[in-house]
Image: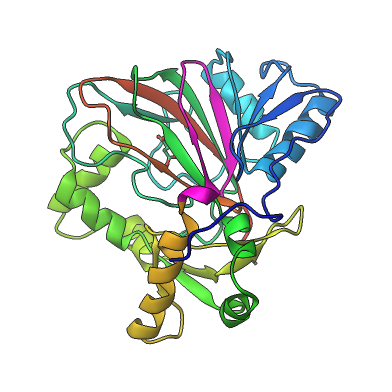
């Protein structure tokens, strides 16, 4: 693959905001937002936070010791909760999903491992995901994102033309198989998914997620109109209407192309952070690189539209 150098298409500069401050994280994407208490966000601050989210694709806040209620309330500013494909939430908060890995968990796979956009196998995948940290390892356990709009912008005109109009079939199939091979059964989202390996027949709900859905490979952001690649290495299983050879040649190029280092940013977690990202504009991955340490985060997702 060609080595990529930042060009005029990279523009992660912060805008000058009146009610918040944005500090860009990497050349490609990401920004820290300062000057706001997420327990008490004014409408003027919220408008700038939303603008910063769409511009930087992933934003994060430090020192936000939120309760589940406050996490839910901030999430609801962006829209109704999405269907979560993996968990039923914590007691009393069905839309707050625990992502907890215990220190003694020796599973070879962690929830969110492998580059992905959240639940694209659903008909209306979540638009925005919000992750809040409570306990994090002393090192490791970072999250990494890649800017899918920037990746699209760096394709040649000819390649863009060739893929415009194509549709991707997304399915839970390969992730479920990987989970069954790698994960010990535990009381975590991914551990509970592993329990399905012993099921004689998969539930109708899992079968629905394995059948999956077909969405445009190049999608348009409903608010900003920005276009981005909508593909990943985890859930994209085929290009609709193509032979496997034709389909593989496109997916095997795009999946690694999209996540090259130049398009990424990486967050080193601290307790009481909240990160929010737009699944329509970026992909992300978690790392399983903190054996012996506990990591406790909570996630909400905001309902999205049918990709177009
Ligand atoms: C996710 O994919 O939502 C999890 C990310 C993480 O735990 O770092």
Residue drawn where x is 42% and y is 85% of the image: 242
| Foreground of the two, 61 or 307 | 61
Could you tell me residue 67's position as x and y percent? Answer: 54, 15
Say whether residue 93 is magenta: no
| Foreground of the two, 16 or 230 | 16
Residue drawn where x is 60% and y is 53% of the image: 280
| Residue 112 in the image: above or below residue 117 | above
| Foreground of the two, 220 or 155 | 155
**Would you say residue 166 is visible in this rendering?**
yes
* 274 horizontally vs 197: left or right: right
Q: Quadrant of the N terminus?
A: bottom left
**Would you say residue 95 is visible in this rendering?**
no
* 62 horizontally vs 104: left or right: right
* 190 horizontally vs 128: left or right: left
Q: What range of the chain is rendered magenta? A: 261-279
Say how many tags the image has: 0
Residue 172: quarter of image: bottom left
Residue 63: quarter of image: top right
């Amino acid at each position: 693959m060609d080595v990529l150098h930042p060009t005029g298409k990279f523009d992660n500069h912060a805008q000058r905001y009146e009610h918040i401050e944005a500090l860009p994280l990497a050349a490609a994407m990401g920004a820290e937002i300062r000057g706001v208490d997420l327990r008490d966000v004014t409408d003027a601050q919220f408008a700038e936070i939303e603008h910063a989210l769409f511009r930087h694709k992933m934003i994060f806040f430090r020192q936000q010791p939120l309760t589940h209620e406050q996490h839910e309330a901030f999430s609801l500013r962006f829209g109704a909760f999405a269907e979560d494909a993996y968990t039923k939430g914590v007691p009393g908060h069905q839309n707050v999903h625990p992502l907890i890995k215990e220190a003694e968990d020796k599973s070879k796979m962690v929830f969110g491992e492998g580059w992905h956009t959240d639940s694209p196998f659903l008909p209306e995948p979540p638009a925005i995901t919000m992750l809040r940290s409570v306990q994090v390892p002393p090192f490791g356990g970072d999250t990494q994102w890649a800017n899918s709009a920037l990746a699209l912008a760096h394709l040649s005109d000819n390649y863009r033309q060739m893929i415009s109009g194509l549709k991707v079939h997304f399915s839970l199939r390969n992730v479920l198989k990987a989970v069954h091979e790698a994960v010990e059964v535990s009381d975590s989202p991914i551990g509970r998914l592993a329990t399905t390996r012993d099921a004689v027949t998969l539930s109708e709900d899992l079968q629905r997620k394995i059948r999956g859905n077909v969405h445009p490979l190049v999608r348009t952001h409903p608010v900003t109109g920005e276009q981005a690649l909508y593909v990943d290495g985890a859930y994209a299983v085929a290009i609709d209407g193509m032979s496997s050879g034709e389909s593989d040649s496109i997916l095997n190029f795009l999946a690694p192309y999209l996540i090259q280092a130049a398009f990424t940013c990486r967050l080193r977690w601290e307790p009481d952070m909240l990160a929010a990202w737009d699944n329509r504009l970026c992909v992300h991955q978690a790392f399983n690189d903190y054996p012996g340490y506990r990591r406790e985060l909570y996630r909400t997702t905001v309902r999205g539209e049918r990709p177009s």
